[in-house]
Amino acid sequence: MSRMSQSAGRGDGWSWVAWHHDYDVPGSPLAQRLAAVQAQIAAALDQAPPGPLRAVSLCAGQGRDLIGVLAGHPRGHDVTARLVELDPDNAATARELAAAAGLPRVEVVLADAAEPAAYAGLVPADLVLACGVFGNIPDEDIRRTIQCLPQLCAAGGTVIWTRGRWAPDLIPQICAWFGAQGFEPLWVSDPALPFGAGAHRFTGIPAPLATGPRMFTFMTDAEIRQARGLPPRQCAEPADPEPAGRGPEPAGRGPEPAGRGPEPAGRGPEPAGRGPEPAGRGPEPAEPS
């Protein structure tokens, strides 16, 4: 999951590298989101047909969601993956993690995850991660990104996404947007959990990959806080889970920015999750975006 246009930050001293620290805090919303997203990734691999598989991650961040599963899953070496991340430090970490896990088929691309061209040659994919994305972009951009997913997802493929449940809860509307594009729900996180995430299977026919327009743009930290009804930030400490990661938000980019799931997993065409996003996210309640 990444950012600032998706870019290296979202302003106000924001650090997407520091954002990942809560993945390592047991029981944190981001850690819970990551576990939930990884469980859905494993389930998608369990159910995938025999043979080679493809995966792409929007705003992938450090790739903890996907790499963490591929490293130990029986189908891990069947997967050719592309992680798209705009933050160079997070991208470097993702490459190190993939190499350490012995996953030569995992490619980390330093690029804007909101640009469809970033996925050329590897879509339609059997697994698409948009973790840490939806919590960092405007509602209209979420809708537009979902409309673009038939270009990225293979028939029968799975999209895993994250988005925090702050009021008003947009997750029911997100599920409706997925349904309108030919996706059926496989799993949606319990509203009582401190993060939001879901998995949908594509039942339609993949569309040709377009050259544009961009799928989304990350909001600034100030814009995100205003949208959530939060006061202006008094310090530059990241504390609101949601890249993926990458997510649960934080693939969730941790049971949400994906691109880059608990959305403590991955963020672009968050986006974790994970396209140019003017940065986006947000100690306050450590709730995954």
Image (cartoon, grey):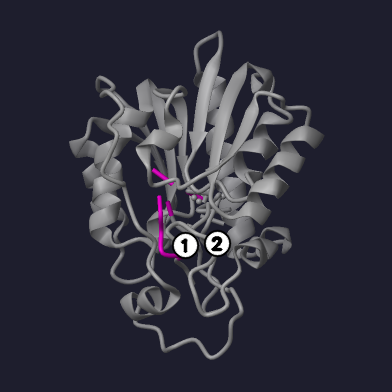
Q: Is residue 183 magenta?
A: no
Identify the amino acid type marked 1. Met
**Residue 259, horizontal then vertical, whole percent:** 48, 48
User: For numbered disc 1, what is the local secondary structure?
Assistant: loop
Label 2–label 1 contact, CB within 8 A: yes
| Res. 41 in view | yes
Residue 137's place in the image compared with 63, above or below, is: below
**Residue 26, horizontal then vertical, whole percent:** 72, 61
User: For numbered disc 2, what is the local secondary structure?
Assistant: loop
The picture quadrant where one finds residue 81 is: top right
View extreme (top): residue: 51
| Res. 262 in view | no
The residue that appears at 60% across and 56% down in the rendered structure is: 32
Report the Cα–Cα distance between label 2 and label 1: 5 Å
Write down the region rendered in magenta.
268-279
The residue that appears at 29% across and 60% down in the rendered structure is: 170
Q: Which mark is residue 8?
A: 2
Q: Which mark is residue 41?
A: none
Label 2 crowding class (10 Å Cα cut-off): few <14, some 14-19, many 20+? many
**Residue 49, horizontal then vertical, whole percent:** 50, 12
Left or right: 163 in relation to 287: left
Residue 21's place in the image compared with 117, above or below, is: below
Q: Which mark is residue 4?
A: 1
Identify the amino acid type marked 2. Ala
Counting every numbered tag in the picture gives 2
Label 1 crowding class (10 Å Cα cut-off): few <14, some 14-19, many 20+? many
The picture quadrant where one finds residue 94 is: top right
